[in-house]
């Protein structure tokens, strides 16, 4: 029998893969054959089937890949900066934001493309096969529009294509400094679009895309409504209630808390992705869970920025839906995000296994991520053929079987056991390597060195 050799260019119209062990339709199965259609979706799945001629065969454990529900690509280049105490010992999210604005002031579309490509290769290697890119850096350095208003969006699309990740581009509307209105600061002028320019940008991008509003502090309710009525039937992303000061300011100007205010005025449903939602009270937890919106939690970023702790226990008890995102990219590792989510609860309750097993945390985040991306959940016919193959010979996986595989994946950190990655049926990571990784990395390094010199 001829089993297809491992080459980079396995891009025939119909791809066939064979997995020794795979998590299919919510259960473990052996000898799984998977056919992928030209659309990148799983066209057929069969268990207890022998490999056939032309199949690419994998040993190890095949599991559904993770979607990254929240990313700001350019911030990858800023990770590790802004970690020194400023004068007055009053460092906060707001002082970090000021430093971040200083960093992004010099970015060009070429820089953003180089950074995105590197970031997305790192995501693929870490097990994220798709990403919702929350993109608000639209304008030139002086705040004026580029001649080609799509140039920054195209830089991100270019980075995603070179890496091979599934991109859900979320162009973001950002129009004002705060709830009281007010002109944008110099650091924010690269973000501004008029509502019409936003709608035009959205319609001119030829890619998978959602709509998004930076936050209720940065976009008035009337503009949220205007965009929502101009572009319907897509995912909707918004940062919400990330900082206590934001909640206080919203209360002061609207008489309501941000999530209350959102739900009072908009028909929030399962197309919505609420990013962070950190500062929620019990009534809001119930409201969000009932609406079936997904909360995109970014534990590493929320810790790094000192945001606060989302009440995940009561949210899960109310059957709330969550996804994870790497946001500012201090780490690109879905296992670490989930581990941190659970560990914060263990530390604050002095108990163990507070939220759930590694298996259920992984599957919960995969399910929420699929909802954010508008895709079917898990490995089943009609879902995107996004698969991670874990190395059964990795020390963390040795002797593990069934759900112990997920638990070992989430709750150990001894190097990366992800050996192969399929994204939309394309075999994008082989033996931990991406085809263009050397070129992408060297381009990234050159870009960062140049950026540091331009500071
Ligand atoms: Zn964010």
Image (cartoon, grey):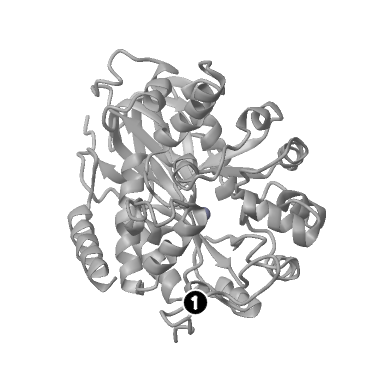
Give the camera-side residue of 329 and 154: 329
Q: Residue at x 51, y 67 (%)?
A: 136
Q: Is residue 150 above or below residue 241?
A: below
Q: Position of residue 455 (x, y in %)?
A: 29, 70
Q: Is residue 228 above or below residue 294?
A: below
Q: Position of residue 305 (x, y in %)?
A: 47, 48
Q: Is residue 372 above or below residue 98?
A: above
Within the image, what quadrant is residue 22 found in?
top left
Within the image, what quadrant is residue 297 found in?
top right
Which residue ends up furthest to the bottom in the rendered image?
147
Side of 81 where 386 appears, left or right: right
Q: Position of residue 100 (x, y in %)?
A: 42, 62
Q: Is residue 383 above or below residue 340?
A: below
Residue for badge 1: 186
Give the camera-side residue of 436 and 338: 338
Side of 155 where 455 appears, left or right: left
Quarter of the image with the N terminus in it: top left
């Amino acid at each position: 029998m001829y089993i297809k050799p491992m080459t980079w260019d396995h891009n025939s119209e119909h791809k066939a893969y064979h997995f020794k062990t795979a998590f299919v339709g919510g259960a473990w199965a052996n000898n799984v054959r998977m056919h992928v259609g030209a659309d990148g979706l799983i066209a057929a799945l069969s268990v207890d089937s022998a490999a056939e001629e032309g199949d690419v065969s994998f040993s190890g454990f095949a599991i559904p890949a993770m979607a990254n529900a929240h990313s700001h690509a350019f911030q990858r280049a800023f990770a590790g900066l802004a970690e020194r105490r400023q004068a007055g010992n009053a460092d906060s999210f707001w002082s970090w934001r000021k430093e971040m604005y200083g960093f992004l002031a010099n970015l060009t579309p070429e820089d953003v493309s180089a950074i995105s490509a590197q970031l997305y290769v790192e995501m693929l290697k870490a097990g994220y096969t798709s990403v919702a890119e929350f993109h608000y850096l639209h304008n030139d350095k002086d705040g004026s529009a580029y001649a080609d208003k799509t140039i920054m969006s195209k830089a991100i699309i270019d980075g995603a294509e070179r890496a091979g990740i599934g991109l859900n581009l979320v162009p973001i509307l950002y129009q004002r400094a705060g709830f009281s209105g007010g002109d944008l600061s110099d650091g924010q002028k690269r973000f501004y679009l008029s509502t019409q320019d936003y709608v035009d940008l959205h319609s001119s991008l030829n890619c998978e895309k959602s709509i998004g509003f930076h936050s209720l502090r940065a976009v008035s309710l009337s503009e949220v409504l205007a965009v929502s009525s101009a572009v319907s039937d897509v995912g909707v992303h918004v940062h919400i209630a990330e900082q206590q000061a934001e909640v206080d300011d919203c209360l002061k100007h609207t008489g309501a808390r941000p999530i209350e205010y959102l739900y009072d005025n908009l028909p929030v449903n399962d197309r919505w992705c609420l990013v962070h939602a950190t500062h929620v009270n019990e009534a809001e937890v119930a409201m969000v869970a009932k609406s079936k919106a997904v909360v995109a939690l970014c534990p590493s970023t929320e810790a790094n920025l000192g945001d606060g702790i989302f009440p995940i226990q009561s949210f899960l008890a109310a059957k709330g839906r969550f996804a994870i995102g790497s946001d500012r990219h201090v780490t690109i590792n879905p296992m670490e995000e989930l581990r941190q989510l659970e560990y914060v609860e263990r530390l604050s309750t002095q108990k163990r296994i507070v939220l759930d097993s590694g298996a259920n945390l992984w599957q919960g985040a995969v399910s929420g991520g699929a909802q954010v991306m508008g895709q079917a959940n898990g490995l089943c016919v009609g879902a995107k053929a996004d698969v991670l193959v874990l190395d059964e010979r990795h020390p963390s996986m040795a002797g593990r079987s069934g759900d112990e595989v997920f638990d070992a994946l989430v709750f150990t950190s001894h190097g990366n056991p992800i050996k192969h990655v399929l994204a939309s049926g394309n075999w994008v990571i082989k033996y931990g390597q991406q085809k263009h990784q050397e070129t992408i990395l060297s381009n990234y390094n050159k870009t960062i060195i140049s950026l540091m010199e331009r500071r």
